[in-house]
């Protein structure tokens, strides 16, 4: 879990900056490579305005290929979403984080609810998450 926390902590400031500067962000991934370095990556298919689901699918495909080659020990995929916050029961914007490690038997889905004010300030609320099925580190 420490690996995932490192990936999340290294990427969230960039996501917050994108929200402040643009009011949104395209999906992106972070991976912990076999030497312990964190790499951030996106996916580009030539489309200037791709659908988020297409970018997420491309990221998963690329991460799965890298995982099969033994290049990564942990990965995260970040994307913008709308969810019902279980702490407030109100639908809200959230930074969704799909997270998976080679060592764990399950993957995780985390949500970081946020508000973006008119003056472009980002405020994160209490996060929540759950275990889900692995997609990247499968055999």
Image: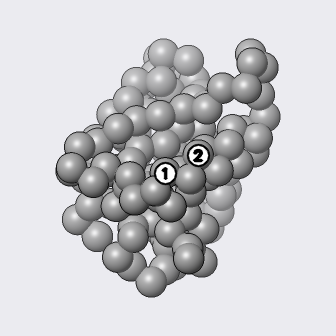
Report whether 63 appears left or right of 60: left
Contact between marks 1 and 2 (CB within 8 A): the answer is yes
100 over 63 or under it: above or below: below
- Residue at 59% x, 38% y: name it: 27
Q: How is the image coloured?
A: one colour
- Residue at 47% x, 34% y: name it: 41
Report whether 14 appears left or right of 19: left
Q: Quarter holding the N terminus?
A: bottom left
Please tell me which residue lies in front, 12 or 64.
Answer: 64
* Image location of residue 86, percent across then percent down: 56, 71
Please tell me which residue lies in front, 107 or 84.
Answer: 107
Location of mark 2 (residue): 62
Q: Return the mark for residue 66.
A: 1
SS label for mark 1: helix
Please identify the quarter of the rendering in which residue 102 is found: bottom left
Report whether 132 appears left or right of 32: right
Direction bottom: furthest residue: 105
* Image location of residue 103, percent across then percent down: 35, 76
């Amino acid at each position: 879990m420490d690996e995932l926390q490192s990936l999340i902590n290294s990427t969230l400031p960039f996501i917050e900056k994108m929200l402040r500067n643009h009011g949104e962000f395209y999906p992106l991934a972070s991976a912990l490579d076999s030497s312990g370095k964190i790499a951030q990556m996106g996916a580009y298919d030539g489309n200037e305005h791709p659908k988020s689901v297409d970018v997420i699918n491309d990221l998963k495909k690329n991460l799965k290929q890298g995982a099969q080659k033994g290049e990564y020990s942990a990965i995260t995929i970040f994307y913008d979403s709308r969810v019902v916050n279980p702490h407030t029961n109100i639908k809200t914007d959230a930074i969704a984080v799909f997270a998976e490690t080679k060592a764990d038997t399950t993957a995780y889905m985390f949500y970081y609810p946020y508000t973006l004010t008119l003056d472009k300030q980002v405020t994160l609320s209490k996060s929540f998450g759950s275990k889900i099925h692995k997609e990247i580190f499968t055999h």
